[in-house]
Image (spheres, helix red, strand yellow):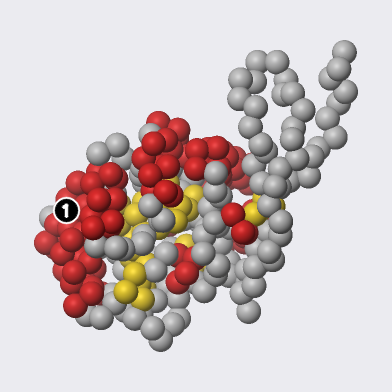
Amino acid sequence: MLGAASAGFGFVPRRALAAGTADVLPPVPQLTHQHDIIAVNSVTIDRPLVALTFDDGPHPEHTPRLLDILKDRKVTATFYLIGRSVRAFPDVARRIAAEGHEIGNHTWSHPELWNLGDYDVLREIDRTNEIIWRTVGLLPVTMRPPYGAITRYQSRMLHDSRLLPTVMWSVDPSDYRRPGPDVVASRIVTKASNGAIVLAHDIHGPTVTAMPATIDGLRERGFGFASMSSLLGWEKWGRVQMAAVEEPEWPDDDD
Ligand SMILES: [Zn+2]
């Protein structure tokens, strides 16, 4: 059973940070949910629901255009954001969250994780969680490895140490090869099935252009749209799955 511990949410005010640290911000909280999922390609459900997921944003032009389309058609999606792009385009990241979409962790610099050691993998994930937290005030509850390049061991490590299941996909229109909007839309619509996770990229203009026909085509086939959390049967993405970290024992800095 996928339960979520409902921990209280709040902050312990932090004492003054070291000189030279400009921002005095609450510490990055920790996830408190416990899920037995380590990695998924799709979700076994008998309801006609799919998750649209968009990787590699936020993009300053294409992502807002996509958000307009999703709002117009009342579709909730999940965005796997790159940390350094969140830093570059924070307003777009904030808009994604403000409009009810879910944000997942797609690493800081988009490397092939399976080439990296544990320290570097965790740093890619932690930096990204931190910038998302500082930008939108929410933490990702799943991660997606760039190129799908992650080892079973690494997925287990991220699950065990960061409570982040790995979300792969079951429908890939290969939109990054730029086959054109019509092909992208028809590939997604024909390959979709109950519980499918659709991979797309909102850094590509033609992918965004394909979305109205994609959404309409999926609806004609009877599908509805779920965020990753709701497709997995979890609580709605938000703060309920987080708890403030313990205040660390800071060295006495009064002198
Ligand atoms: Zn990517």
Left or right of residue 241, residue 186 in this image: left
Residue 249 showing in the rendered view: yes
Q: Position of residue 232 (x, y in %)?
A: 50, 72
Q: Position of residue 254 (x, y in %)?
A: 86, 17
Along the line of sight, which residue is nearer the eye, 168 or 149? Answer: 168
Q: Quadrant of residue 148?
A: bottom left
191 over 148 or under it: above or below: below
48 over 131 or under it: above or below: below
Left or right of residue 71, residue 119 in this image: right
Q: Quadrant of residue 119?
A: top right
Going by the numbered disc 1, the residue's amino acid type is Thr
Q: How many numbered marks have been drawn onto this rendered protein structure?
A: 1
Which residue is rendered at x = 61% and y = 25% of the image? Answer: 23
50 over 61 or under it: above or below: below
Q: Quadrant of the C terminus?
A: top right
Which residue does the numbered mark 1 point to in the structure image? 209
Q: Quadrant of the N terminus?
A: bottom right
List the single residue furthest toward the top.
255
Left or right of residue 190, residue 241 in this image: right
Along the line of sight, which residue is nearer the eye, 27 or 189? Answer: 27
Along the line of sight, which residue is nearer the eye, 193 or 149? Answer: 193
Left or right of residue 64, residue 141 in this image: right
Alpha-carbon neighbours of circle 1 within 10 Å: few (<14), some, or many (≥20)? Answer: many
Q: Secondary structure at mark 1?
A: helix
Q: Position of residue 191 (x, y in %)?
A: 25, 74
Residue 178 showing in the rendered view: no
Which residue is rendered at x = 74% and y = 35% of the image? Answer: 13
Q: Position of residue 239 (x, y in %)?
A: 59, 54
Which residue is rendered at x = 18% and y = 61% of the image? Answer: 212
CB at mark 1 closer than 8 A to ligand 1? no
Which residue is rendered at x = 38% and y = 52% of the image? Answer: 99
